Image: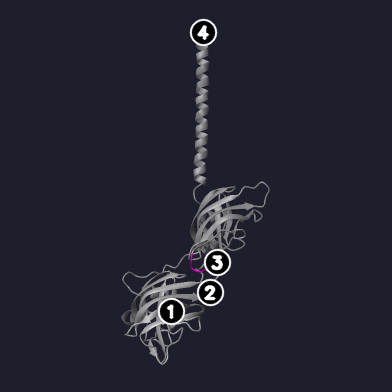
Amino acid sequence: MRRRTVGIAIAALLLLALVGFAGVQFLVHRGASDAALVAAKPTTCDDAFRVLKLAPSVVSAARPVCLAQSLQFSGELRGSVRQGYVVNRDGVAPAAMCTVPKRWDDFPQARLAVVLGSKAYRLTFAASGPSEHQPVTFSNVAGHLDLVSISDPSADWNQATGTFAVNADGISGAIEADLLRDVSGARPVHVNGKWACGASSTQSSQANVPCSLFYSLNQLQEADVARMRAQSCKAEDLTFSGAITGHLDHAVNDHAIRPHPGIDGDNYCGAIGNQYDASLKFSIGDESFLLNLNPRAYPSVGPGRYAAGSGPFSANAFLWLGHADPGQGGLFVPDEKVYWYGSTGNFTIANDMRSGIIDETFSGVLGHSSSTVHITGSWGCA
């Protein structure tokens, strides 16, 4: 009987020991899990400032270029990034934010200082080629993506496979790629999510204010805006597709400011001898354009249908990229290198000689000869 009692006591002690061990293991695993959750908290620019031990003056300079990110890292490096600041090619000093590239200018390179764990890294997106203000995805990313430790530049994940995308603004996009460093046995770092190295323009049209995007984007003077609203903002119904997309419901034809004829003429609406000019200036997205309907006929241009020419020197219409100059009353200044000419289709001039319809494709010239813009709908210049 006594042996039985001792055996029961020993069994009870063993059971308590097992329960205690299991409890300790549970707490250990729970603690590890809680630590993992803390470690997985998305890092911010403040984390980068702290890890890099930036001086207060440098932190002040870096805050304006601290941008929202949404990046996940797994594999050899793990973590998530909610913010990163735009950093110089070398060192830790902040750099200027990327600006939206002008159409057919090269994409800017994005360099972001981010933190994973307790270390800071420089993540670089180097998109190649010119911006066409269209979204683009790069599948051959070797040499275009790089992740390097800021404290140890020899730790460089520069062998990249996968894709990264650039939005139409040219300064933001997405990534789904593996980055590998040239070390025997190294595992790749998988990166996915959204990135940004600049802020897109906040200019937008005001509700129920025709032509307001054109006024704000070109920062026109209040007096010029008042005049254009009263006399020069004309109703349109034009749809753009191809390299430029959008619907245009109003455009400016401002006879009060230096009207002049020609293929890049501004503010004209009417016949001059054997030629005709109807100019419309407007904004779509973050760009401004001038459309000039410019047919020729001997002895004079009258109502009717005018077909596109066979090339730039015989074209019946031109579309220019440019801007309205606030220092010259809003006079349009075309970019002489970025324009399209009417290559196929036609437009009509109505009996009033101030309106008509158009269904025409415009082709780019020089370095953007593959670019086309299709315009269809009704137009008016007075």
Whether residue 330 is visible here, answered yes or no, is no
Q: Secondary structure at mark 4?
A: helix
Q: CA distance from mark 3 to mark 4?
A: 87 Å
First reached walking from the N terminus: tag 3 or tag 1: 3
Circle nearer the viewer, 3 or 1: 1
Q: Amino acid at mark 2?
A: Ser
Query: Residue 130 at x, y = what percent?
Result: 55, 69
The disc at residue 108 is 3
How crowded is the residue under tag 4: few (<14 C-alpha within 10 Å), some, or many (20+)? few
Taking the image as shown, residue 124 lies to the left or right of residue 290, namely right
The C terminus appears in which quarter of the rendering? bottom left
Residue at the extreme right: 184
Colouring method of the image: one colour
**Residue holding disc 2:** 369
First reached walking from the N terminus: tag 3 or tag 4: 4
Q: Amino acid at mark 3?
A: Pro
Q: Secondary structure at mark 1?
A: strand
Q: Residue placed at 32% from the left, 82% from the top?
A: 231
Circle nearer the viewer, 4 or 2: 2
Quarter of the image for residue 241 reads: bottom left
Relative to residue 160, is residue 217 depicted above or below?
A: below
Q: CA distance from mark 3 to mark 1?
A: 27 Å
Q: CA distance from mark 4 to mark 1?
A: 107 Å
Q: Residue placed at 53% from the left, 49% from the top?
A: 79
Q: Nearer the viewer, residue 65 or 365?
A: 365
Q: Which residues are magenta?
A: 129-134
**Residue holding disc 4:** 2
First reached walking from the N terminus: tag 4 or tag 1: 4
Query: Residue 62 at x, y = what percent?
Result: 52, 62
**Residue holding disc 1:** 290
Label pair 3/2, CB-CB below 8 angstroms:
no
Quarter of the image for residue 348 reads: bottom left
